[in-house]
Amino acid sequence: MTLTEKTVLAKSAAPVPARRPPELAVRRARAARLFIAPNLLAVLVFLLFPLGFSLYLSFQEWDLFGPIRFTGFTNFRRLLTADPLFVIALRNTIVFTLGTVLPTVAISLVVAGALNRRIKGITVFRAVMFLPLAVSSVVMAVIWRFVFDTNNGLLNTMLGWAGVGPVPWLVDPSWAMVSVCLVTIWKSVPFATVVLLAAMQGVPDDLYEAARIDGAGAIRRFVSITVPMIRGALSFILVVSIINAVQAFDQIYVLTGGHGGPETGTYVFGIMIFQYAFAFGDAGYACAIAWLIFVVLLALTAAHVRFSRKNAADT
């Protein structure tokens, strides 16, 4: 081997010094961190700190004013074994969830399928359908409270024209649950429709054309093509609707009050947390309830993510 070849090999074997990033790239990275810092600070102050503090309080006894006293797992033990209100709230939350999630998904599927068709006047229909998204939940509940009024409400007045006696919408326990379910469905359908409509518009037209050539009707095409192709969006809507139903508070509070409605007919977890925190002065116990719900919803979300990944892999 010649001297020249040895020199070339030595230079190639020598470690290449790391190149310093240009000054412009460093300045851009620093500027990006400065722009992100306020958002990170907001997340820390308004999300992570309350989350951590509520977890800390779930192991304490605190009336919002006096000193905090550590109690360990007493709050969780009491919640799962010695609180009859927990059983009532669990039952009502399950009924409320089933009574809102299933109709919301079914109605949203039908409405999204109708909006996905290219017919005259569909733009106006879409605008009308999406109006509930622009209304505050509290304002919506106040309006619906007047509609459901037993004596002078709009709904009972219209039923009277048809010869039907007044319905105790917000007075009877069973009807109170039906009322809050109807209002929640009315509020939830537009968001679910938007998501499902976006998914439907991503389905290739070639599939529908091939099915049409094979003689498949509209219902057959919807069941065999549309629904399987948007199952990811469907599972997302299902999980989000369940989370919203379990966390429901504002519309139920305005419609039936913070005491859980007539004979605890609408006493759900949201009302239970509010009562223990601000009416009974037991913030630690209220945080324990919230964290139990959080764990259940976290497990449900994790199952949804795993299901979505499996579907993506199979596709």
Image: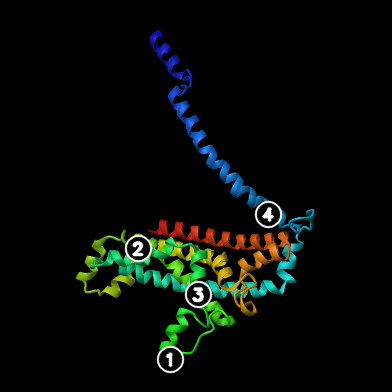
Residue indicated by mark 3: 146
Graded by Cα atoms within 10 Å as few (under 14), some (14 to 19) or many (20 or more), the crowding at tag 2 reads many
Question: How is the protein colored in the picture?
Answer: rainbow
Residue that numbered label 4 is attached to: 55
Spot the residue most to the left. 213
Label 4 crowd (10 A; few <14 / some 14-19 / many >=20): some
Q: Are marks 4 and 2 in contact (CB under 8 Å)?
A: no
In this rendering, the answer to whether 122 lies above or below 182 is above
Amino acid under label 4?
Leu
Residue appearing at x 32%, y 69% in the figure: 113
Upstream in sequence: badge 3 or badge 1 = 3
Kind of residue indicated by mark 1: Gly
Q: Secondary structure at mark 1?
A: loop
Q: Between 43 and 294, which is closer to the camera in this rendering?
A: 43
For the point 56% across and 44% down, the residue is 42
Q: Position of residue 191 (x, y in %)?
A: 42, 63
Alpha carbon of mark 2 to alpha carbon of mark 3: how far?
32 Å
- 2 vs 3, front mark: 3
Residue at the disc numbered 2:
197
